[in-house]
Amino acid sequence: MVSRALPKRPARVGPAAAPEALAARIFLLAYDPAKGRLTGRSKLGKTLRAAALIDLQLRGNLADDNGRAQVTKAKPPTDEILAGILTEIGTTGSRKWRTWIDRRQRAIVRDVRDDLARAQLIRVEPHRILGLIPADRITIRQPLVRRQLLQRTTDVLRPSRLVTRIDLRDAALAVLASTADLRVVIPKELRTRHKDRLAQLTVRVGPVVPALKKSFQSSSSG
């Protein structure tokens, strides 16, 4: 069995390396340091799947084919989570983006968590809720990494920055956090104030975020 590979060229943020994968970055951003726990757990799986799909699209491994995810001939990623999703899509065939968002949600949360633990960015400790229910206690080992990721994510909302000049990976984090209602990243008042800007950024990021929004709407209505 091939072990999951960490990114070979991680972006340097502070004294430690921030994870390159968007899903890993969203996981860190979803952690609330004040409360000492992950937030938005009910939506986290879908959000991480959407982040991975955006990653694959930005890397050139996936293209949009009339609302469907289409595998390209680009070199597959070395990251095992991304490679696994790409293989899944290639094996099953072209489907709507939402189909891939809705699949294997628990698995991606576990896989991203384990990658971050191996990279020593988080600590995962087993414990029992009320002494009975098994659970994992997660803590951030590199708080500065998260703080600087948060700064980069919220910085895209500054009106002085041209929407067309914003890095698409940073834009993706902002619109994913907004769509998933991760208020620890983008508070409600900030989301309301920059509603139009977030809509413009969503258009730039591509078709995955609207599909994620539809998935959330379907879950809440069901």
Image (spheres, rainbow, N blue to C red):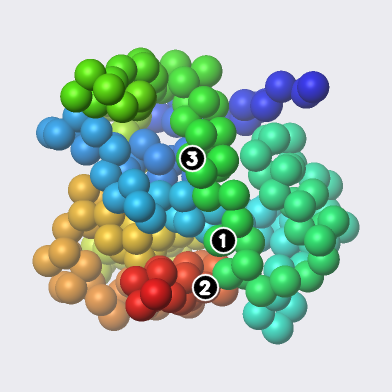
Amino acid found under the numbered disc labelled 3: Val
Query: Where is mark 2, residue-wise?
Result: 211
Inter-mark Cα distance, 1 to 2: 8 Å
Above or below, 170 against 122 in this view is: below
Q: Nearer the viewer, residue 125 or 76?
A: 125
Above or below, 35 against 95 in this view is: above
Query: Is label 1 in contact with label 2 (beta carbons under 8 Å)?
Result: yes
Percent across and percent down for residue 5 are 68, 26
Query: Where is mark 3, residue-wise?
Result: 109
Are there few (<14), some (14-19), or many (20+) residues within 10 Å of tag 2? many
- With 175 as the anchor, is 150 left or right in this view? left
Q: Nearer the viewer, residue 108 or 120?
A: 108
Q: Nearer the viewer, residue 151 or 111?
A: 111
Percent across and percent down for residue 28 are 36, 36
The numbered mark, 3 or 2, whose residue comes first in the sequence reads: 3
Are there few (<14), some (14-19), or many (20+) residues within 10 Å of tag 1? many
Percent across and percent down for residue 61 are 75, 56
